[in-house]
Amino acid sequence: MAAAVVLGGPAGWWRWHRRVRAARAAMVCSRAMASKTPVGFIGLGNMGNPMAKNLVKHGYPVIAYDVFPEACKEFQDLGAQVTDSPADVAERADRIITMLPSSPNAKEVYTGANGILKKVKKGSLLIDSSTIDPAVSKELAKAVEKMGAVFMDAPVSGGVGAARAGNLTFMVGGVEQEFDAAKELLTCMGSNVVYCGEVGTGQAAKICNNMLLAISMIGTAETMNLGIRLGLDPKLLAKILNMSSGRCWSSDTYNPVPGVMEGVPSANNYQGGFGTTLMAKDLGLAQISATNTKTPVPLGSQAHQIYRMMCAKGYALKDFSAVFQFLREEETL
């Protein structure tokens, strides 16, 4: 009863209890926001743009850079800081994500004249989500380590749609003790974050995945083309494939035939998505790895040849599912 008197009776006790709960909630919120220090993001293309937006949606202040300044304007409107170089990003953020087209781009961003390593702070966490040669990832990791920072390779799978929805799969390579720190950021952009092993193993997993993806996309395109020429309705054929043993991601999620699915590049003249040039590049990386490890990849080699031919015949900027259109036009293949 004495406590009730001091607190002003039952009503006073409930006011006190509400204040305590509010204070505890504020402490929890404060701790959560404390971890949301600025995150650098370099590379705001088809994939990097929605990935960075998802970081913003999760409350992270983003410090952005892209070699094309117009790519940054949208982020300025969202309240992000925009910098003039990767080095400037490294000066302002101790967690940085890079999403770049190729190995040379990654080398330039990290080790170039205005690269990240010019101003990187000791203890910084650098996560590269580009798809590059595993050997280059290892090379960059050594350079980063010399500066007292941490490098992890974390390439992605899922395409632009998954990037927008925050449902990407990340394949992470690096020091295992740093995985949780990387995962905190990556789960804002993906639904699956998988630790693969030492630096370079994330890239290895991604290269293997994309070789299979290219092979299955070509197979789906060939199958749909044959079925259409045999008189089957493409939607009906896709439905049958997707309830049968031939089902795959290229047939049920990213069908290459115009009119079969909505919201995929084939429904938009193969614009957007994952470019044919990038697929050819990834298949080239797979070929290099296969040669280095003396691994026979006959279908991967054939897929590489087909995508290189597509690049030479005007399909370079179209989505890689345009292989259906390519095959329709190449009667003599």
Image: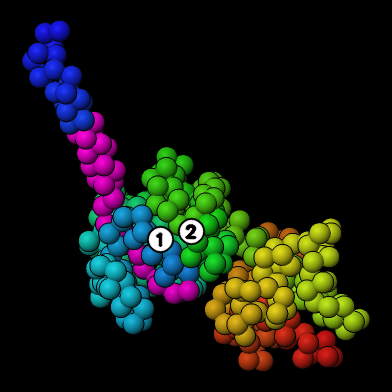
Q: Is residue 194 left or right of residue 240?
A: left
Q: Which amino acid does label 2 sit on?
A: Gly
Q: The N terminus is located in which quarter?
A: top left
Q: Is residue 25 part of the magenta span, yes or no?
A: yes
Depth order, front residue of 272/112 = 272
Q: Where is residue 57 in the image (x, y as percent from the top left)?
A: 36, 59
Contact check, label 2 and label 1, Cβ < 8 Å: yes
The residue shown at (35%, 65%) is 41
Q: Which mark, by number, is residue 166?
A: 2
Quadrant in the rendering for residue 99 = bottom left
| Residue identified by numbered label 1 | 54
Q: What element carries label 1?
A: helix
Q: Residue 225: in sight, yes or no? A: yes
The residue shown at (60%, 70%) is 282
Quadrant in the rendering for residue 327 = bottom right
Q: State which region is magenta.
A: 20-46
Q: What residue type is labelled 1?
A: Asn
In this view, the residue farthest toward the top is 1
3D distance between C-alphas at marks 2 and 1: 7 Å
Label 1: how many residues lie within 10 Å, few (<14), some (14-19) or many (20+)? Answer: many
Depth order, front residue of 63/209 = 63
Q: Is mark 2 on a helix, strand or loop?
A: loop
Q: Is residue 33 left or right of residue 289?
A: left
Q: Position of residue 3 (x, y in %)?
A: 13, 12
Label 2: how many residues lie within 10 Å, few (<14), some (14-19) or many (20+)? Answer: many
The residue shown at (65%, 60%) is 209
From the viewer's perspective, is residue 100 above or below residue 243?
below
Quadrant in the rendering for residue 73 = bottom left
Of callouts 2 and 1, which one flags the residue occurring earlier in the amino acid sequence?
A: 1
Q: In this view, does 33 lie to the left or right of 175?
A: left
The residue shown at (81%, 59%) is 243
